């Protein structure tokens, strides 16, 4: 019998492009003053801007508070990246 993992809610609240709250966060993969990369329930989330800060992290609750000058938010699918990496290895070692 196949089990299906329950997907948690993911929410993104952005206030005046200066502060944000992200829920449904699984991990903080990297961050600096210009980029923050988060693994969320809905895929990878890249936050770009200037003077970015991670003010609060609570991975037990899956919450992150951000601040700075937020220029863009972009998502990428976790599963498609993994499939592409697998197919690349298959092509290399055939």
Image (cartoon, rainbow, N blue to C red):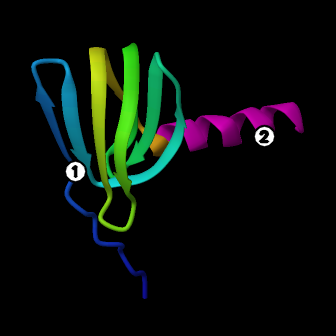
Q: Residue furthest right?
A: 93
Local secondary structure at mark 2: helix
| Residue 24 occupies quadrant | bottom left
Question: In front of the other: label 1 or label 2?
Answer: 1
Q: What distance separates the C-alpha of mark 1 from that of mark 2?
A: 33 Å
Q: Position of residue 79 (x, y in %)?
A: 48, 45
Reply yes or no: does residue 83 show up in magenta.
Answer: yes
How many residues crowd mark 1 within 10 Å: few (<14), some (14–19), many (20+)? some
Determine if residue 48 is in view.
Answer: no
Determine if residue 2 is in view.
Answer: yes
Q: Residue 53's mark?
A: none
| Residue 52 occupies quadrant | top left
Q: Work out which quarter of the rendered image holds the N terminus and state it.
A: bottom left
Q: Is residue 15 left or right of residue 78?
A: left
- Residue positioned 47% across, 43% down in the render: 78
9 to 66, vertically: above or below: below
Local secondary structure at mark 1: loop
Label 2 belongs to which residue? 90
How many residues crowd mark 2 within 10 Å: few (<14), some (14–19), many (20+)? few
Reply yes or no: does residue 26 show up in magenta.
Answer: no
Q: Position of residue 77 (x, y in %)?
A: 41, 38
Label 1 belongs to which residue? 10
- Relative depth, front residue between 73 and 75: 73
Q: Work out which quarter of the rendered image holds the C terminus and state it.
A: top right
Marks 1 and 2, the one that precedes in the sequence: 1
- Relative depth, front residue between 36 and 2: 36
Per the picture, the main secondary structure of the magenta-coloured stretch is: helix
Query: Which range of residues does the magenta coloring cover?
Result: 80-94
């Amino acid at each position: 019998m196949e089990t299906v993992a329950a997907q948690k809610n993911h929410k993104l609240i952005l206030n005046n492009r200066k502060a944000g709250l992200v829920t449904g966060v699984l991990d903080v993969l990297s961050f600096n003053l210009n980029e923050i990369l988060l693994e969320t329930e809905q895929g990878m989330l890249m936050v770009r801007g200037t003077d970015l800060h991670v003010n609060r992290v609570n991975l037990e609750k899956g919450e992150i508070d951000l601040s700075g000058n937020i220029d863009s938010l972009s998502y990428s699918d976790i599963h498609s990246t993994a499939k592409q990496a697998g197919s690349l290895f298959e092509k290399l070692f055939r």
